Every structure is written in C-alpha cells, then in structure tokens.
Amino acid sequence: MASPNAEGWHGWDTYAPFYDWENARTLGRRDVPFWVKTIGETRGPVLELGCGTGRLLAPIARSWLPSGTDANRRLLGIDRSAPMLARARRRLARVPNAVRPSLLRGDVRALPVRPGKLGAIVAAYGLLQSLLNDRDLEATLASAAGALRRGGLLGIDLVPDLAVWEEYAGRIPIRGQFAPGTTLTLIESVRQDRRRGLTIFDEQYVVRRGRHVRRHQFQLTFRTLPMAQILARLEGAGFRIDDVRGSYDGEAWYPEADVWVVLARRR
C-alpha cells in the first residue's frame, strides 16, 4: 500500500516526461473547450492549480486574444514539480506575449498570491484528489478562498472512477511510439486502500530505442471523496455551490458519471 508518509505530489517529477504522451491517449483534449469557455466568462486574474505541462494554460491563453492587453486579465499557473514546469515553459513559449501565462513553483496548500485578487481558480483533472488527507484538502480550499475576490470562481473536476478502479498487477495499458525510433510501454499495477480512500498506481515506463532500454519507476496516489463530502468541504471553506455537472457538456450530475464538475463562488 501507499507509504503512510506519501504525499500527492510524490512521483510527478518522474512522470513529467511521459505525462503528455499518456494524456493524449486517455483524456486528450476532451475537457479543454469546457475550461476555455468557463474561464472566458470570468474577469480578473486566473490561476490554475497543478498546471503541469501547460496542457490547459496554452489553449485558455490563446482564447483570450485579442483581449490580452487588458491588465486585469492575467493567467497564471502553479505547480510543485520543476520538471513539469520546465515542459510548461517550453509549451507556453509559443503563446503570444500579450497573453502568455506566468508560472509559479509553489504549494497549492499555501498559494503565493495576494489575498482577494484572483477572479478565478481552476483545479482541473482531479487535482484535489492528489490531496491525500483532510488537512491538505482543507488547507488548499482555505488558500483558494483567501486568494479569490468575493464572487470569484473556483472550478474543479474530479475523476470518480479512481475509487472503483480494478486492482491488477503488471498490466500493459498503453504502448506506442514515443519519438522516432523509440517506443514507450507503460507497465502498471493498481491497488486500493479502501480504509483511507486511496488509489495507488505503481508505474513503470519502459523506453526502448533499438537495444537500449531505460526503465522509469514511480508511484502516484489519489484520494477520492464522495460528492456530498466535497460539497460540504467547499461550503465549509466559504464557497457557495453554483453548479454540479456529470460531464463537460453540461449533463446533470449522478454518482456514476464519467466526470464530476463543480463550480463554486467565494461568498
């Protein structure tokens, strides 16, 4: 099982070179139009928590053209992983200067931004599920509430099937070309810690180029709470729930929905 000292950010530095490759074969860009539209309707600075490689930041920024000259319309991303941010910088270098996001290396539990200044915060693709205990979740929500102005938007989405993910060992869910002449194979094992609500992925990425083989091993751990608890935590942190959805297309929420989306406002 996961180490009792494990934290949700563990493993992401090693995962960074493979994140975009795997994501393109799983989620892809399915959530991008939703976040582009949602953030496009807000005013003031916007911060993405756990921005990773800039997968969302880049299309959101480009959607702001030609209004990027508005000084109040700034886009920022924060992540704890330096390797993830290095990839984000390379991606965002292709975004026009007028709307290019700023990147911060920091901890989502203690946001390094001025209180009450942000118009919106996005915690996409299960970011909150990387917070493995109540203390970390409460700290993150409190920090987000403090950084948002009154009425500011907090948008989150969660991956509900993590909690019911089948347990297995040594399975190969993905294999394909990684670069010209190079193949990448993911060998994966999944375990559930039902008592703590944790899903643990033991990942091994095998990079093969001719006879040369390199193996990269790490562990990712996620915690999934029932929707009722998520909503209660948000309300306890000072948010008003605006909308709860079961898809990026606006479908009503239900427990077996493919994705859980919550939009809330700071009271």
Image (tube, rainbow, N blue to C red):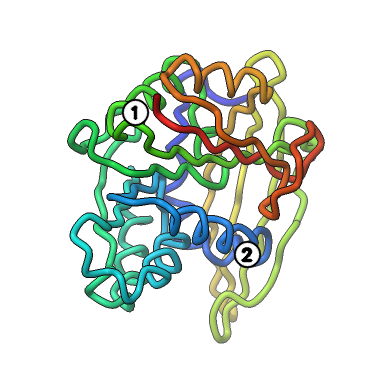
Left or right, residue 146 beside residue 262? left
Left or right, residue 229 beside residue 235? right
- Residue 182: give x, y in percent of width and height: 57, 79
- Please say if 177 is above or below 195: below
Q: Which three-letter amino acid code belongs to the residue tagged 1?
A: Arg
Classify residue 221 by image quadrant.
top right
Classify residue 129 by image quadrant.
top right
Residue at the (58%, 42%) spot, across then down: 157
- Residue 210: give x, y in percent of width and height: 59, 81
Left or right, residue 139 beside residue 106? right
- Please say if 163 is above or below 210: above
Residue at the (60%, 65%) spot, across then down: 29
According to the picture, the residue beneath numbered tag 2 turns out to be: 28
Classify residue 206 by image quadrant.
bottom right
Which quarter of the image is occupied by the C terminus? Answer: top left
- Please say if 83 is above or below 226: below
Q: Furthest-bottom residue in view?
A: 180
- The reply to whether dot 2 and dot 1 touch (C-beta < 8 Å) is no
- Residue 45: give x, y in percent of width and height: 28, 50
Q: SS of the residue at dot 2?
A: loop
The disc placed on residue 109 is 1
Residue at the (57%, 63%) spot, across then down: 33
